[in-house]
């Protein structure tokens, strides 16, 4: 008998840990609470309560919460009406389709501003109610109510409730925010979000955030709506902003950004595997190279209800070279400079915005020509330069379709090398003060709940004095795989004319973005390949690789 008891004890010791490790993971879905109230303002209260409870549960470890977006897709596929959703059998069916093993449902009863809330935790496999409770309090104490319900559910699964939930469930005082208004704005926003009316959802969430800037649920949903933008961009000349200034009229929060980019040539025609050199077609004895680097630090912020401003500081440098691989003389010219861009945007109507930008900067040019006779160095005086840009955009109500056009004008001195008289002393280089017109047109279409974007860009560079032209067409696609990660890719076709020569070119671009949702940091990486006219030898065309990165911080200080 003693041996039998010993055997049973040993068996239990072995089985208990095994059962613990094989326990089914908790997958939980929260269904919108049903509301019984004569107050029309409380119409969407059940949606707001369900999301506040969901986000509190989301803070607990070892519980997987089924996202609202996934739940809504199932409801749409099943074509359930509001009355269908009130049926417990249909609720359990939805839970099973979501692969949730537990379901939270509830009812809200309004007694002249005092809420009586009943809630249930249901096992979707057995349809049994495993937890049922009731809680009463004023509408303004929604934080206490939702935290108490979430805490009860978390504790049922023997999971430790986060300290933040415990504190909320113990404190009933309403602090310096109009709590009921926060709840109503948030509930209305969730209803608009479900209906894909993201413009209304954003406005309601912004109202809630003004009243309670640190409300976690409000911030999470606002961050979801950040996905309503595409990260596909092309890098412009250093004296233009990287985005149409008309967008400043519709931005909702401030942004601090750092941009770093470079331009390198992809040919490898020089001996000894000297990367980036391309043979000059006009005289194949020589090779050429163009390189650029650019750094920008900027800050943009909304101003009043329909305006925005941006200030950017930038530094750039470039180098142009001709090289003789046999005799090894070199012509090298370069310029560097720094300056600032001031931009302003104004949205006179919800569907239309205008923008202007002014760039002012200084630059200097230096270089040398090497030959058997030695080196001749030069350094031109520092010059002051300006550029002006402007643009507009039109959009539909929810910003799922945006057409914008952005143009600029600059007058900049350039030096042209002559391969026929190589190597060129400074006195034989041709200096041209060339007007340059730049234009970028973009059509952006958002679809798939704003997780996917189709972008079509068309860009033009026009030099009227010399008759030079470069036009590019860039269709691209971008998709957010997660709310924190997107990928994009596009192709480029170019038509170029310079010194009477016409040339075609093909290229492409790719990139990805990584977002720290809670902190507001974005990291964008882009690489483009293109063909373009040379800026220092007439009639030459070259292939370039352009990597650039953007690091930005959103929502630091100012909200619309």
Image: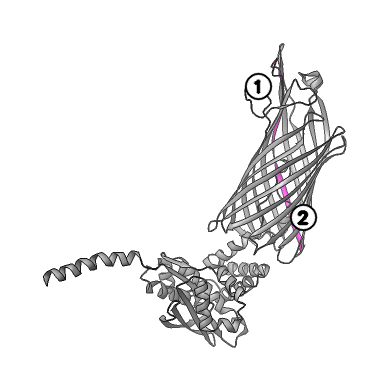
The crowd level at tag 1 (other Cα within 10 Å; few <14, some 14-19, many 20+) is few
| Image: 280 above or below 74 | above
User: Which quadrant of the structure image shows residue 329?
Assistant: top right
The spot of residue 21 in percent (x, y) is 34, 64
Decide which of 188, 411 is in the foreground and name it. 188
* Percent of width and height locating residue 218: 56, 67
Tag 1 secondary structure: loop
Front residue of 550 and 279? 279
| Quarter of the image with the N terminus in it | bottom left
Q: Is residue 171 visible?
A: no
Residue 345 is a magenta residue: yes
Q: Which residue is mark 2?
A: 404
Of residues 339 and 74, the one drawn nearer to the viewer in this rendering: 74
- Separation (CA) of disc 2 from disc 1: 46 Å
Residue 107 located left or right of residue 319 = left
Relative to residue 526, is residue 252 depicted above or below? below
> Which region shows up in magenta?
327-348
Residue found at the very far top of the displayed protein: 373
Q: Secondary structure at mark 2?
A: strand
- Magenta region's main secondary structure? strand
On the image, which quarter does residue 388 sit in? top right
Image x and y of residue 174, in percent: 49, 75
Q: Quadrant of residue 540?
A: top right
Q: Which residue is mark 1?
A: 271
Q: Is residue 307 magenta?
A: no
């Amino acid at each position: 008998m003693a041996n039998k008891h010993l055997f049973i004890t040993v068996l239990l010791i072995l089985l208990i840990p095994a059962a613990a490790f094989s326990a089914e993971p908790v997958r939980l879905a929260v269904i919108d609470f049903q509301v019984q109230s004569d107050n029309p303002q409380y119409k969407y209260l059940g949606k707001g309560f369900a999301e506040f409870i969901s986000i509190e549960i989301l803070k607990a470890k070892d519980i997987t919460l089924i996202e609202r977006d996934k739940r809504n897709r199932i409801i749409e596929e099943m074509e359930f009406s509001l009355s269908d959703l009130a049926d417990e059998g249909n609720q359990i069916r939805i839970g099973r389709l979501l692969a949730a093993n537990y379901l939270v449902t509830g009812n809200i009863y309004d007694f002249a501003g005092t809420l009586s809330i009943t809630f249930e935790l249901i096992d979707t496999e057995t349809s049994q109610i495993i937890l049922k409770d009731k809680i009463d309090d004023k509408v303004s104490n929604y934080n206490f109510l939702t935290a108490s319900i979430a805490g009860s559910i978390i504790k049922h699964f023997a999971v430790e409730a986060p300290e933040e939930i415990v504190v909320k469930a113990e404190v009933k005082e309403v602090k310096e925010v109009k709590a009921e208004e926060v709840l109503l704005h948030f509930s209305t926003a969730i209803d608009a979000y479900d209906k894909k009316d993201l413009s209304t959802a954003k406005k309601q969430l912004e109202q809630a955030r003004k009243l309670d800037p640190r409300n976690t649920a409000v911030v999470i949903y606002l961050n979801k709506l950040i996905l309503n933008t595409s990260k596909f961009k092309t890098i412009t000349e250093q004296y233009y902003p990287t985005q149409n200034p008309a967008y400043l009229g519709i931005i909702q929060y401030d942004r601090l950004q750092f941009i770093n980019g470079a331009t390198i040539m992809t040919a490898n025609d020089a001996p000894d595997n000297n990367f980036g050199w391309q043979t000059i077609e006009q005289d194949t004895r020589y090779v050429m190279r163009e390189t650029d680097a650019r750094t920008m630090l900027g800050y943009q912020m909304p101003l009043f209800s329909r305006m925005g401003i941006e200030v950017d500081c930038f530094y750039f440098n470039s180098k142009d070279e001709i090289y003789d691989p046999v005799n090894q003389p070199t012509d090298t010219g370069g310029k560097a400079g720094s300056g600032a861009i001031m931009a302003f945007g104004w949205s006179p109507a919800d569907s239309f915005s205008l923008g202007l930008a002014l760039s002012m900067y200084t630059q200097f040019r230096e270089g040398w020509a090497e030959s058997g006779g030695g080196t001749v160095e030069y350094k031109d005086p520092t010059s002051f330069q300006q550029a002006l840009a402007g643009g507009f955009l039109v959009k539909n109500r929810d910003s799922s379709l945006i057409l914008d056009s952005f143009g600029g004008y600059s007058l900049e001195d350039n030096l042209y090398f002559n391969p026929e008289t190589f190597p060129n002393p400074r006195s034989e280089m041709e200096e041209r003060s060339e007007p340059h017109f730049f234009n970028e047109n973009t059509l952006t279409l958002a679809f798939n709940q704003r997780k996917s974007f189709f972008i079509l860009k068309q860009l033009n560079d026009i030099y009227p004095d010399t008759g030079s032209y470069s036009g590019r067409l860039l269709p691209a696609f971008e998709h957010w795989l997660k709310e924190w990660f997107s990928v994009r890719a596009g192709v480029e076709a170019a038509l170029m004319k310079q010194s009477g020569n016409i040339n075609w070119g093909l290229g492409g671009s790719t990139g990805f973005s990584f977002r720290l949702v809670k902190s507001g940091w974005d990291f964008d990486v882009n690489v483009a390949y293109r063909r373009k006219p040379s800026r220092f030898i007439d009639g030459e065309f070259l292939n370039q690789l352009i990597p650039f990165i953007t690091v930005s911080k959103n929502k630091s200080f100012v909200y619309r």
